[in-house]
Image: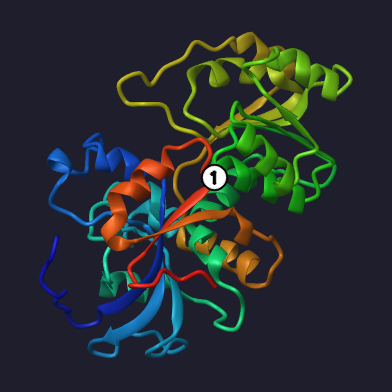
Amino acid sequence: QEVEDPVLQPGDVLVAVESAGVCGTDVRIFKGEHSAYANCVGRVPGHEIVGRIAEGVGGGVRPELTLGDLVFVAPNIGCGRCAQCARGNENLCRSTEGIGITLDGGFAQYVVVPARAVERGNLIGLDDSRPRRAAVLIEPLACVLRGQNKVDVHLGDTVLVAGGGPVGLLHVALAKARGASLVVCSEPSSVRREAARRAGASVVIDPTACDLAEAVAEATAGDGMDVVITAAPVHDLQTAAMGLAAPGGRVLFFGGLPKSRPTVELDTNEIHYKELTTAGTTASTVNDCRRAAELVSRGLIELDWMVSDIFALEDFAQAIDKAQDAAALKVVISPASTPETS
């Protein structure tokens, strides 16, 4: 659809979009299953955005950034006044806004970053001299980083990542980068199991071909995993997570369940008698995004290979279909007439 050129208010910044990642949230939006979109119309989605500063009004560009700079756009914007924002948890702000969720996003040639987001540092400069294919993964990596910080993934841990989609692969890669001694990935897709090996998994499991609990016991000599991360919205995974954890282990509920069926039955005796720590995280903060951008920009975590498919803007519907294909990894929209592949 052709729309009017964005109108900037004082302090707003216009970003020319180079690439925007497609994630599960975008698929739900496309299907009309997201509460922020009435009947799947009325707003431009896309919240994993990399582009160049095209225009700033009223001195809105921060001093460290200038016109033409390559930037990543942190999508979440808190009110800046509540207790959660004061703690740096703008993702938990009751009035939080999201570029590509409650505001027009990056599946377009241009996206407006409002002045209140510019002031709070949501525009993050990137090193233009480095390969930038993986830059579009900064936002999901920030979410993954927040999750792993919550359960303190560290040197020597054994980590199970249940789910080998793009987010699961980021969990595998980050756990390996943080020094996990053993990373196990459970994933039914053979393509994604192979990708999990490339991301750093030492053991990959096909849960449709064997018993997951038995496979974990074999991989850990019966000890269980120090960290269990449910990186797919699967009820059975959440139910099984406590039993897969070692005594004293940590369980992260990362993949949210559908609102139509948001509950599972848990054996809380597992939590009690094994002294487990359970946690959940949602989205990310600007600080999470800055730390993720540093990991990518400095080459501390290598992710370029995870971008499997790049589509032009007019092929958006095909991109949504591809994002639901178990053979795909990260799917990206490039609004340029010739998709960016560098």
Give the tally of numbered discs: 1
201 or 206, nearer to the observer: 206
**Residue name at image x 14 percent, y 77 percent:** 7
Q: Is residue 252 above or below residue 174?
A: above
* Amino acid found under the numbered disc labelled 1: Pro
x then y, percent, for residue 14: 28, 78
Around disc 1, counting alpha carbons within 10 Å, would you say few (fewer than 14), some (14 to 19), or many (20 or more)?
many
Left or right: 207 with respect to 181? left
34 or 206, nearer to the observer: 206
Helix, strand or loop at label 1? It is helix
**Residue name at image x 30 percent, y 21 percent:** 260
282 or 104, nearer to the observer: 104
Q: Quadrant of the rendered structure where residue 266 is?
A: top right
Left or right: 113 with respect to 323? left
x then y, percent, for residue 255: 49, 33
The quadrant the C terminus occupies is: bottom right
Q: Which residue is at the far right?
A: 221
x then y, percent, for residue 304: 61, 61
Circle 1 is placed at which residue position?
166
Left or right: 66 with respect to 223? left
Q: Which residue is at the far left?
A: 4
Q: How is the image coloured?
A: rainbow
**Residue name at image x 69 percent, y 49 percent:** 173
Left or right: 202 with respect to 80? right
The quadrant the N terminus occupies is: bottom left
Q: Quadrant of the rendered structure where residue 211 is?
A: top right
x then y, percent, for residue 132: 55, 71
**Residue name at image x 12 percent, y 67 percent:** 3
Is residue 125 visible in the rendered image? The answer is: yes
Is residue 107 visible in the rendered image? The answer is: no
Q: Quadrant of the rendered structure where residue 209 is?
A: top right
Q: Is residue 165 above or below residue 186?
A: below
